[in-house]
Amino acid sequence: MAIAVAGQSAYDMFGDEAILTEEFLSKDFRTWEGGLVSINHENNNHLLNKARISDLEYDPETKLVWATFNDLPQKTLDLINSDSTKGFRRNAFPSKWKEERSRKDTAQGLLW
């Protein structure tokens, strides 16, 4: 699933906006590897079989970050792939930070 695209807005925990740059995504997209999957930013990963983000790839042509979510329950996969949820955004949060990056380049939330 595509989880981020260069140029999109993202917001930190204070609500400050940052733009996800192509440089940030191409260099730091792997920081999401192993991150927990949740619904609506809630503490509900346990409902999703403790699913984690894996198999991250950055496509420089489309400027998209792609990910796989391991161990999602079949009901969740069916919902994600259903016609009723197509076009809705998916969110990802970095699981670690690069201290040398500026706040503008290390946006907390990825929206796609």
Image (cartoon, rainbow, N blue to C red):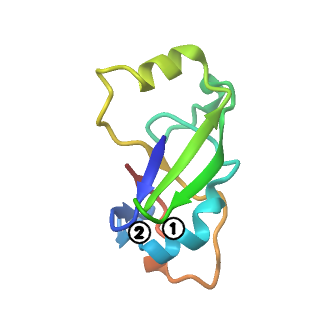
Percent coordinates x, y for residue 95 in the rendering: 65, 57
Percent coordinates x, y for residue 38 in the rendering: 54, 36
- Look at mark 2 in the image and give the residue it sits on: 20
Percent coordinates x, y for residue 94 in the rendering: 59, 59
* Residue at x 64%, y 60% (from the top left corner): 30
Q: Earlier in the sequence, mark 2 or mark 1?
A: 2
Q: Amino acid at mark 2?
A: Leu
Answer with the quarter of the image where residue 87 lies: top left
Mark 2 residue element: loop
Q: How many angstroms separate mark 2 from mark 1 (CA)?
A: 7 Å
Residue 92 relative to residue 48: left or right? left
The numbered disc on residue 25 is 1
* Residue at x 32%, y 27% (from the top left corner): 85
* Residue at x 37%, y 20% (from the top left corner): 82
Residue 43 relative to residue 3: left or right? right
Mark 1 residue element: helix
Badge 1 crowding class, 10 Å Cα cut-off, few under 14, some 14 to 19, many 20 or more, is many
* Residue at x 42%, y 24% (from the top left corner): 81
| Up-down relation of residue 86 to residue 83 (above or below) | below
Residue 58 relative to residue 71: left or right? left
Q: Amino acid at mark 1?
A: Leu
Q: How many discs appear?
A: 2
Badge 2 crowding class, 10 Å Cα cut-off, few under 14, some 14 to 19, many 20 or more, is many
